[in-house]
Amino acid sequence: MRSSRLRPSREVGLKLLRILGFYLGLIAIWSLLGRAEVWSPFLFPSPERVFESLRANLANGLILDGLQASLRRLVVGYAISFVLGMSLGLLMATWRFADETVGGMVLGLQSLPSITWLPLAVLWFGLSESAIIFVVLMGSTFSIAISARSGMRGLPPLLARAAGTLGATRWQLYRYVVVPAMVPSMVQGMKQGWSFAWRSLMAGELLFVSVGLGHLLDVGRSLNNINMVFAIMLVIVIVGVAVDRLLFGRAEAWVRERWGFAAG
Amino acid sequence: MALVTGTETQAAGPGGQSGVAAEEPEPLLALRRITKRFHTKRQDTLALDDVTLEVRPREFICIVGPSGCGKSTLLNIAAGIDMDYEGEASFEGAPIRGMAQQRAVIFQEPALFPWLNVRANVEFGLKLRNVPKEQRREIVDRHLNLVNLSRFDRAYVHELSGGMKQRAQLARGLAVEPHALLMDEPFAALDAQTRDDLQMELQSVWARIGTTVLFVTHNVREAVILGDRVVVMSPSPGRIKTIIDVNLGRPRTADDHAVADLAAQVRYELQNTGAPPEPRYAI
């Protein structure tokens, strides 16, 4: 077992090399197309100009301020939606009446693209921070609620029995069995909730004049600054991938290690 | 010493061993006049019809019977999992009022917690009881060793084979030092080879710790290998047909002639139920 340890790391190294090669190749083609000026540079910038814009906007703090504003909204909205979604999910899982009534509504509301809450949010909260957080909230709450419900419902009765025969009290059953058993489902729901929240936040900021990455995208558009538009899009992609890989990727790997591939 | 009350009412097994019956100990587990009905939309089924079974301390009792004879139902009642029945179930003289650590249950499916590794699974019941960490480790080590699973203490459930999962389940049940072990067809889902191995291991474990075991199986030979007594049940309605004493030396193996002979006898009892012409017992 120990001797085979080296091999996976070499595999990973080769994989990274291939990925790196792909992106370098992509940038090279992009650069060639940009320099050849097949399309006007005002419509299709070269990577050099995009990176220059990225550097300049990082240096003047525009991107960092926008990033900070966006992430703050995301964290606040997501945290509230976690508490709300969890409560809603547990209510649905444990109370039949809530499941039959609120449960159906939650499923319906989840199918609603969360950006469609923006007009309503603006009418309710005005052009304020609350409005945009409300949109983020609506994006992720229902996913989290549904996964909390199914996580709790999905507990195999056999495990509850096993815990009972080992002497678990009702409280211990929740603490040591129900909650940990919910984890795979919760990781999936929280990942989905995050991606809905992130998408709706960007859409909201784009339509909604105030600071934030989405807003910077709109600024770039109104200045006819294609370099900036490309640069900001790049930042949005990087943030999305980073959260997905670092946070949820790790959580999923952890679930896989414990539960095996059968989980979820 | 053991109180002798109404020993004569208890039927001596075939070829009743002389002298032994005189010192009948108080039963550890007593299931008296148990009747259990399952209600479905179409009909009510009598799963257990006035079943009485007493298990003595340190006894290994096997219950065999075809599916639907209520053997698992009886075990669930003894475990305190099933509380909806008529009759009287008591353990150590007190009525059974729910699941409890004194009666560890080993399920047919490996009911291990997938988010915990083997060690943490075995530790589970001890943790619930707030046993100090050091002591916990010592108890877990001892029981992992008992079931030959020490090398896999860090493995997660999905990494174990079927036999290893059942070993882990056994260790988890034994770690809380139960007064009785209730095993519900624990080897039924295993391949023949693994089942043979685990039968041998269970015998040696039982020889070492000498706890009381109620073991449900549909495998006649398994019942004869493991049991001090074999309870033969018949279905529709679930009744105890006969109880056969197994007065054979241990350890027993599947190849022992005496085991084979007795298994044939048990099998005859099972097949001789003369399936009643009215197949379902509707009320």
Image: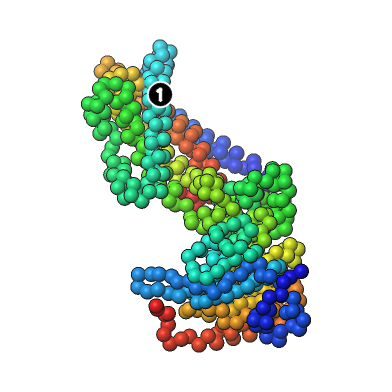
- For residue A133, say whether it is visible: yes
Q: x, y (%) of residue A59?
A: 43, 13
Query: Which residue is nearer to you in this view: B37 or A225?
Result: B37
**Left or right of B46 on screen, residue B152:** right
Question: Considering only vertical position in the picture, is A57 above or below A80?
Answer: above
Residue at (45% x, 32% y) in the render: A243
* Residue in view at x 75 percent, y 73 percent: B250
Q: Is residue A113 left or right of residue A180?
A: left
Q: Residue A205: x and y, percent?
A: 31, 24
Q: Identify residue for label 1.
A: A72
Task: Identify residue type, mark 1.
Answer: Arg
Q: Chain of mark 1?
A: A
- Name above or below for residue A211 compared with residue A197: above
Q: Secondary structure at mark 1?
A: helix
Q: Position of residue A9 (x, y in %)?
A: 60, 39
State the quadrant of the C terminus of chain B. Answer: bottom left
Q: Is residue B6 above or below residue A202?
A: below
Answer with the quarter of the image where residue A116 lies. Answer: top left
Image quadrant containing the N terminus of chain B: bottom right
Which residue is at 49% across, 50% downward?
A263
Instruction: Answer yes or no: is residue A29 visible.
Output: no
Task: Pinpoint residue B42: horizontal percent, then vertical percent.
Answer: 35, 73
Instruction: Give the quarter of the image for residue B281.
Output: bottom left
Q: Crowdedness of circle 1 by 10 Å Cα count: few (<14), some, many (20+)?
A: some
Query: Which of the colour schemes (rainbow, by chain, secondary structure, one colour) is used?
Result: rainbow
Q: Depth check: A12 or B263 in front?
A: B263
